[in-house]
Amino acid sequence: MIRGLEPVRPGIIAALHSEALADAAGIAAGRIPVRLCANEREFDSCLDGARTPMVLAELGPQTSTLMLSRLIDGHGRPVIAVLPSGPLPISQIITLALSQTRFELVHDVSELSAAIRMAQAQAMIDCEVGEIARALAWRVDRESLEDVLGMLILGRRPTSVHDALARLHRTAVLRTALRERSLPTPARLLGWGSVFHLVWQVERYGRDFAAAARSVGFESSRQASDAVKFHTGHAAMSVLRGPGFEGILDEFVRRLGSAERSPEISTTLKATDYLRICS
């Protein structure tokens, strides 16, 4: 696009594979210029010519290890990561989290417009998943981290235990694996995921409690408050006025204290560990 003699620099760099999502990105962005990048080389070129943009990226099996490394090396640009409808790409998400990349997860294309508006309105876009992953990474083994974080992520939106287990490819064994490692049940983890997301949205993004509760899937503010009380032991308003997100994360980590670290993990996991695992 040309305005006078100067090109309009993109505000969103979109590293997308599917045409449907590319079309949706253009519509969701409204008047924000979007530049689509089909491969890693184009992506590098896009970053060089962009004005402090945000990056919109697809996660999943078509996202190469090289592209994931490019997202991490995006010079501090925030990433809006669109999740697939199928298996959850948990290793890719952990890679983003442990690299200190600021990112937000979009669970469905219908959420894309709101995510872009939020990213533009906030000076520091980020989601709670990154903080949770970094808090857990050196306390539990890799398999536990993927299982626990995966369920917490899926708990950010309405889902059943059966559907969540299917998206982690762990339908038959996850309950037993969690129990053997003294970790919460899948249902409890989904509940904690909804509470973490709810508190983060209100505390960090300043969202109205009722609106945030609806986005997580609660039918009412009362139901959301009951969930916060059930999982944290404190009333929702007491959490928001007192310990906040950091406080309930500390409590969650404390409750996981009985989980033993795997012998194969002797140091804090780095993003490069997950790049190697995914390759």
Image: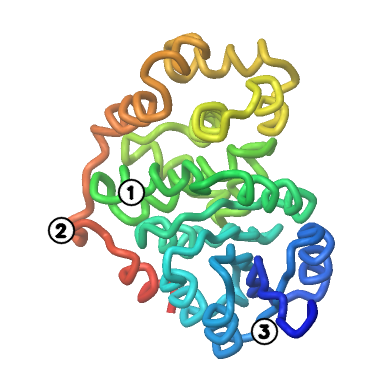
- Of label 3 and label 1, which has the lower sequence position? 3
User: What residue did someone put label 2 on?
Assistant: 266
Q: Residue drawn 71% across and 30% down?
A: 217
- Mark 2 in CB contact with mark 1 (< 8 angstroms): no
x, y percent for residue 124: 49, 47
User: What residue did someone put label 1 on?
Assistant: 134
Q: In the visual, does 184 lie left or right of 259?
A: right
Mark 3 element type: loop
Q: Amino acid at mark 2?
A: Ser
Q: In the visual, does 184 lie left or right of 78?
A: left
Of residues 242 and 219, the one drawn nearer to the viewer in this rendering? 242
Mark 2 element type: loop
In which quadrant of the rendered view does residue 238 lie?
top left
Q: Residue drawn 72% across and 75% down?
A: 8
In which quadrant of the rendered view does residue 86 lie?
bottom right
x, y percent for residue 269: 27, 60
Q: Residue drawn 67% across and 49% down?
A: 115
Which quadrant of the rendered structure holds the N terminus?
bottom right
x, y percent for residue 134: 33, 48
- Of label 2 and label 3, which has the lower sequence position? 3
- Vertical side of 193 occupied by 131: above or below: below
Q: CA distance from mark 2 to mark 1?
A: 16 Å
